[in-house]
Image: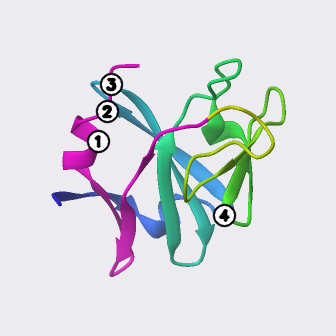
Amino acid sequence: MSWIDICAIDDIPLRGARKLKTALGCVAVFRTGEEEVFAASDTCPHKGGPLSEGIVHGQSVTCPLHNWVFDLNSGHAQGEDGRIATYPARTEAGRVLIDVARLATRSAA
């Protein structure tokens, strides 16, 4: 894996998100706990809602447009036929890191 530092953990509000713009599209980085983060596509496959503006609860996010709930571990929509891409993310010494190698393999948004 090829980890890059994207921000301080405190730059992301607890149970909130930060949008990371990449050449291939936007990725949402979610903070679900004091030291727990997840990274996933920022776009809901249902109606294109910005998941970084959704409600973060447990290890899930709810789309702000039509209330689809996505598991941030797997990317699967709960009770729906849909999925978002997920990417490895972690915290280290108060910093948020994301695997840029995995991100580079995603298809263009």
Image quadrant containing the C terminus = top left
Q: Amino acid at mark 2?
A: Arg
- Disc 2 on helix, strand or loop? loop
Q: Amino acid at mark 1?
A: Leu
| x and y, in percent, of residue 38 in the image | 50, 59
Q: Are marks 3 and 1 in contact (CB under 8 Å)?
A: no
Sequence-earlier tag: 4 or 1: 4
Q: Are marks 4 and 1 in contact (CB under 8 Å)?
A: no
| x and y, in percent, of residue 94 in the image | 39, 77
Q: Are marks 4 and 3 in contact (CB under 8 Å)?
A: no
Q: Is 37 in the magenta?
A: no
Distance (Cα) linking label 3 and label 1 = 9 Å
Residue at 52%, 47% in the rendered image? 18
Q: Amino acid at mark 3?
A: Ser
Left or right, 46 with reference to 6: right
Image quadrant containing the N terminus = bottom left
Q: Are marks 2 and 1 in contact (CB under 8 Å)?
A: yes
Sequence-earlier tag: 4 or 3: 4
Residue 30: name its quadrant. Answer: bottom right
- Give the residue at mark 4: 59
Q: Residues within 10 Å of mark 2 (few under 14, many from 20)?
A: some
Left or right, 76 with reference to 62: left
| Highlighted magenta segment, given as a residue range | 83-109
Q: Is 94 in the magenta?
A: yes
- Disc 1 on helix, strand or loop? helix
Q: Amino acid at mark 4?
A: Gln
Q: Is residue 89 shown above or below 109?
A: below
- Give the residue at mark 3: 107
| x and y, in percent, of residue 61 in the image | 70, 49
Q: Residues within 10 Å of mark 3 (few under 14, many from 20)?
A: few
Tell me the tag on residue 106.
Answer: 2
Q: Nearer the viewer, mark 3 or mark 1?
A: 3
